[in-house]
Amino acid sequence: ICLTAALGAAALSLTAPASAAASASEFEISKNIPITAARTLTLKLHGVQDGDERGGYDIIRVFDGEKLLQTIRIADAAGGKYTDCYEPESSDKVIVEDMNFDSFRDFRVQAAVPAGPNLTYCCFLWDHRAGRFVHSEALGRLSDPQFDQRAKLVRSSYRDGAARYGSEVYKFRKGRLRLVESTDVKYIAQKEQLFKVTTTKRLINGRMKVVRVVKTPSHE
């Protein structure tokens, strides 16, 4: 399993925020999604938020005009009752963009508040044939995903403590997310000298292979 996916899976523990269970207020926000130039859907997200502005969503309803098109329960999609983030009452927390580069808009919400910078999301892709959103487990495993619309690539970055970090590049192939390149940087001590080791891998003939390893003295 790739490191960013492993870190993402570790961060993706969707339980009700501890503060939400004690003293929280319910809310509902709306967000429009222009699926195509001629069709706009509306998301209505139900959730809770406490006095420290931390909370999350548990139910997302999708409307096509006045018609209820779909009900998404976080418990069914991602395994926990709530997502977890700060200021969930803000519609800015619902990110709308084409995440699988099929010309249809998708959406995601922050899944959890990690101890470090490795943000993960609950990602929902629009299935044009089914006429509904489908939860993407593959994208949900990635740490801090960025979607390059021009190159049609998904870029992910991660940090594993003070001595290791890296990035990964993914591509959708026949509807499946595939790792195509990774860069891993770690610091190791040898004979009282600290070295920075950068390992680059690429997908070659169906397998990830090391194409470059650079080891340099570190002065950091």
Image: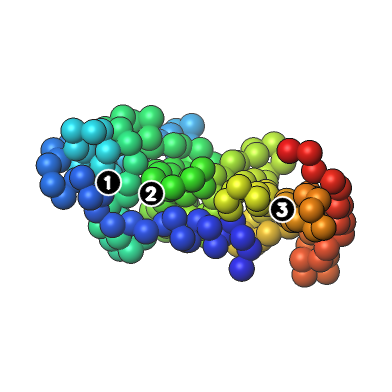
Q: Is residue 15 left or right of residue 117?
A: left
Q: Distance between the residues labelled 3 and 1?
A: 36 Å
Report the label total: 3
- Looking at the rendered image, the disc whose residue lies closer to the viewer, 1 or 2, is 2
Work out which quarter of the rendered image holds the N terminus and state it: bottom right
Residue denoted by label 2? 112
Residues at discs 3 and 2 in contact (Cβ within 8 Å): no
Q: How many other residues sit within 10 Å of disc 3, few (<14), some (14-19) or many (≥20)?
A: some
Mark 1 residue element: strand
**What is the three-letter code of the residue carrying label 3?**
Lys
Numbered disc in front, either 3 or 2: 3
On the image, the x and y values in percent for residue 83 come to 32, 49
Q: Nearer the viewer, residue 176 or 122?
A: 122
Identify the residue at image location x=38%, y=49%.
112
Q: Distance between the residues labelled 1 and 2?
A: 11 Å
Task: Tell me residue 6's x, y (percent).
Answer: 55, 62
Check disc 1 and report the residue beneath it. Answer: 57
Q: Quadrant of residue 28?
A: top left
Q: Earlier in the sequence, mark 3 or mark 1?
A: 1
Question: Residue 186 shows which numbered tag?
Answer: 3
Quick one: SS at disc 3? Answer: strand
